[in-house]
Image (cartoon, rainbow, N blue to C red):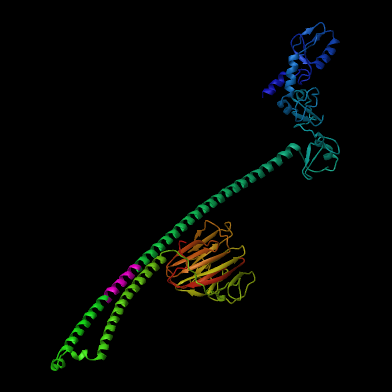
Amino acid sequence: MASTGLRKELECSICMSVYTDPVTLRCGHSFCRDCINNMQDTDGGSGAYSCPECRATFRKQPPLQRSISLCNVVENFRSTPSHQEEITGIRCTYCIHSPVPAVRSCLLCEASLCDNHLRVHSKGPEHVLTDPSTSLENRKCSVHKEVLKYYCTEDAACICVSCSLAGEHQGHRVEMLDEASEKKKKKLRNVLLKLDSKRNKTRDRVHSLEERRRKAQEKASREAERVTALFIDIRRRVDDLEKKVLRKISRREEQVSLLLSDVMIEKLEIENDKLSRKMRHIEELCNMTDPLTVLQDPDTGDLCDPEEDGGDEDTGGHDGGDEDTGGHDGGDRGAELISHISHTLSAMIRGINVIFYVQDPADILLDVNTASNNLLISDDLKTATCTRITQNRPETAERFQDYDQVMSRRGFTSGGHYWDVEISGSGWWMVGMCYPSIARRVLHSHIGNNKSWCLYKGQVYNNQYSLIHDSKEIQLPQQISSDRVRICLDYEAGQLSFYELCDPIRHLHTFTAAFSDPLHAVLCVYEGSIKISRGAMRNHHRRILPSNW
């Protein structure tokens, strides 16, 4: 603001502009040379001269002294950037010696005025003052060249008095420009408030989505860490079990080999001693001279029979068979060890959450006898499509009446099963399982009551997805991006799980209940269609999907 104060000090009191070729009177006041010369020419006719600033009088025309220092200050001021900025806008029309910024424009005079000239400007009502403008001709009527004072509400145009009284807007409803402007400003303020509210809601929505994305990323990171740790632990346990099994097998092999070696050697030594005794006895008999002694020897009956000697060899062979029996006993113990290890490994695998799927699918077919009249069932009994053309099916006790629903023909009373669906269309839908005793003809016969469990997608709350049972709703924190859903049943475990078939597969929720009746697949579709893409069964001793996957 220092430049503004300096400008005041450098203004000529006659032209109200910055000095041009400044000169100084004897009284000390300075003026533009041309300005003071004009004043002295006027005063010369009266025979006296005076200072325009302090009114000091002079009998003779006072000499004009050029102020070199003041000239230098004025030149420096004119060259400063602040002064250049001040004069880059609209300039005062009447400040001809030095450019001065204008503060107002007169539409009647078609001139722009600075502060000093605005003070002496006419205050008449016909002199309409506006913000400084270079296009003052746009503020006048192009036909009558009069100032635009009124606003035609019917044609939404600014008009002059002549347009309203005798021109093309004659008889139209008109308003003063200020009044019309205030009304429009009021509307714009209302629009601004609405836009501001909408912007705030959008900003809140963005923050909410960013927070949900952050939480989803954190959850995914935690799940990845948990799965990584799980598989590291699985690999460690399998490696430890492998080493343990190999060590046991090796020790058992050593024990059996050592046992077989000791038994065989011991039996062979016994057999060798027995044969040696027999040979010595025979040699003694052969050396005897008394025939009566030789013939009456009680042990010679077996020794002289070569067939029986062969039988003794067979007996020895049978002893070898005993050795084989001993080896068989060792084999039985090895089999028991292998069986024990196998059971241990099976128990550990059952404790690990591993997914096993069956190769052969089992068909799940829709029961047309249960289908609502607003559902069109495909020929292969796999697809249910909502239609506004009634199917005119007979009304029976088993047919759904109030909702567009259909059940499967088959119910499940044991084992593990899963089936997939593909959804097309943007309407709301439900998929799940129900007891056959579910109501068919009353208000609360929709899926999600106390006899059914379902995954629900609605349109009311921004396509919110929920899990429903016994009319109790569990909203999913995230929307489902895939159009394929898997429903898994483990009847004995009392678990019904829902999964989104994306990459990777995502667990949505698991219901836990003590199932008492057969469970049927059930669909409800309000717009579009739902197709059962596949279904499969598992042995009831195994899980289809772990509940905490």
Give above or below for 257 relative to 471.
below
Measured as percent of width and height from the top left, residue 242 is found at: 39, 65
Give percent across and percent down for residue 289.
14, 91
Q: Is residue 261 magenta?
A: yes
Visible in this render: residue 203? Answer: yes
Given residues 480 and 146, the one toward you in this image is: 480
Total number of numbered labels?
Answer: 0
User: In the drawing, does residue 429 fall left or right of residue 255?
Assistant: right
Residue 98 percent coordinates (x, y): 78, 23
In the image, residue 148 sits, relative to residue 453, either above or below, namely: above
Task: Name the residue nearer the viewer: 388 or 266.
Answer: 266
Along the line of sight, the residue nearer the viewer: 68 or 305: 305
Quarter that holds the N terminus: top right
362 on left or right of 174: left
Give yes or no for residue 549 being in the magenta stretch: no
Q: Position of residue 45 (x, y in %)?
A: 86, 10
Please identify the dominant SS of the magenta region.
Answer: helix
Q: Residue at x 80, y 43 (%)?
A: 172
Residue 546 horizontal side relative to residue 162, left or right: left
Q: Which residues are magenta?
A: 250-264
Residue at (73%, 18%) from the top-left corner? 73
Residue at horizontal 77 percent and vertical 28 percent from the top: 91
Looking at the image, can residue 471 be seen? Answer: no
Quadrant of res 74: top right
User: Which residue is at the front of the view, 333 or 516?
Assistant: 333
* Furthest residue in direction top, as rendered: 59
Rendered image quadrant of residue 284? bottom left
